[in-house]
Amino acid sequence: MTTRPPTASGLDDVVAAETALSDVDGQAGRLVIRGHRVEDLVSSATFEEVCGLMWQGAMPAPAEREGLRTALAGARDHAFGLIPSLGAALEATDAMEALRAAVAHLRTTGNLHDDAVLLTGAIPVFAAAWHRAREARELVPPDASLTQAADFLHMLSGTAAPPARVAGLDAYLCCVVDHGMNASTFVARAVASTGSDPVSAIVAAIGALKGPLHGGAPGPVLDMLDAIGRPERARAWLEGELAAGRRIMGMGHRIYRVRDPRAAALERAASALERSGAATERLLMARSVEREAERLLAERHPERHLKTNVEFYTAVLLEAVGVPRTLFSTTFAASRVVGWCAHVEEQRRVGRLIRPASRYVGPAA
Ligand code: COA
């Protein structure tokens, strides 16, 4: 049997699937999603359009987009109706743990597209319900007249969100929908390759996304900005972290050797909010911390080109639109579920079990 040499670095450069969904060029800093540059999707598409693009392969016409919006609204309504039967799922202290448990209660419809709609509609409902329950506030039922982004903010706060905030969240949801063979997508595809159902695949993917090296960084990015407090303290604080052997959250990436293109797209989306009077202080602070962190990391790891990743400006943008930091990872899941479902469908068409090899290094019999 021919095998690649085992690698301690995490399967770098191993091609695990052919995909028509997204292409990440880490050297050029380019992300193409079904033929569209991510920055174009962020600046000019809506979340519902990106769902159509991912699941059907082309930008939906206006009537199809409205059909998707209505279908997602129906899925949110269905998920809200399930909440009384979720047992203790939403009582978990960690939002991702609650989400994983709640999503596990969904039942597959037996149709991949319908499952994608069901799962995508459910995640913001469970996330908002977890947040409201923790604050001992009454749950807010979904509003079928709203878009997914507008309804998520409405279910969180109980009031209609200003259009600039809805646009900011919509931009985020478009931005992180898919990203090549990242860890959670690989997990979803591995589960799908066994012939298991999409709900099982997405529960497993949520588990993978929960880890701080994947989807858990934006909350700690805000904690870092809070701890630094003032731009002039950034260098000393970051030096202290590196000296203690800790990683700077929101910096570095397995694939990108330049600034993550999603960081730029999200910084632009946050700047749009800045023009409407929000996020000004945070952005000032974030930009100076980014400059110092990149400078320090370049001194320490000149060979690695450690630059800003998507999580850095995710933190700034999600805070500005009004998503509490405890929900940053679940909001990531609310977008990435669209990509996971598209990969599940793609993998099911391939129809071959993912089953890599390992090299035994234990004692001989
Ligand atoms: N801060 C400090 N040092 C970092 C770093 C960071 N954010 N990212 C990487 N490094 C260091 C590593 O410690 C390693 O140093 P060593 O060889 O002395 O041990 C070196 O740079 C090489 O790391 P690399 O191989 O590029 O990292 P990776 O591919 O294993 O990890 C991440 C990629 C994303 C996990 C890593 O950059 C990281 O932990 N970043 C912070 C968490 C984060 O923002 N996650 C969200 C990712 S989108």
Image (cartoon, rainbow, N blue to C red):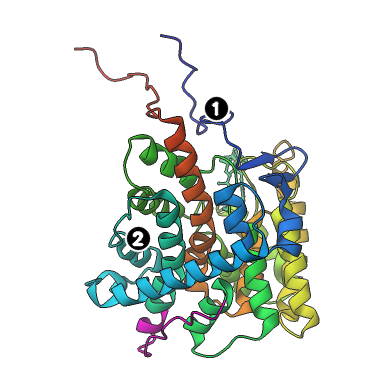
Compared with 11, 147 (above or below) is below
Which numbered disc, 2 or 1, marks the residue that appears first in the sequence? Answer: 1
Asked whether the viewer can see residue 176, the reply is: no
Q: Position of residue 69 (x, y in %)?
A: 55, 69
Residue at the top extreme? 1
x and y percent of residue 248 in the render? 61, 56
Which quarter of the rendered picture does the N terminus lie within?
top left
SS state under label 2: helix
Q: Residue at x 74, y 65 (%)?
A: 267
Identify the residue position indicated by label 1 in the image: 14
Residue 141 picture quarter: bottom left
State which region is magenta. 131-146
Q: In the picture provided, is 16 more to the left or to the right than 176?
A: left
Give residue 100's mark: 2
Residue at 69% x, 64% y is 236
Disc 1 crowd rating (10 Å Cα; few below 14, some 14-19, many 20+) is few
What amino acid does circle 1 point to?
Val
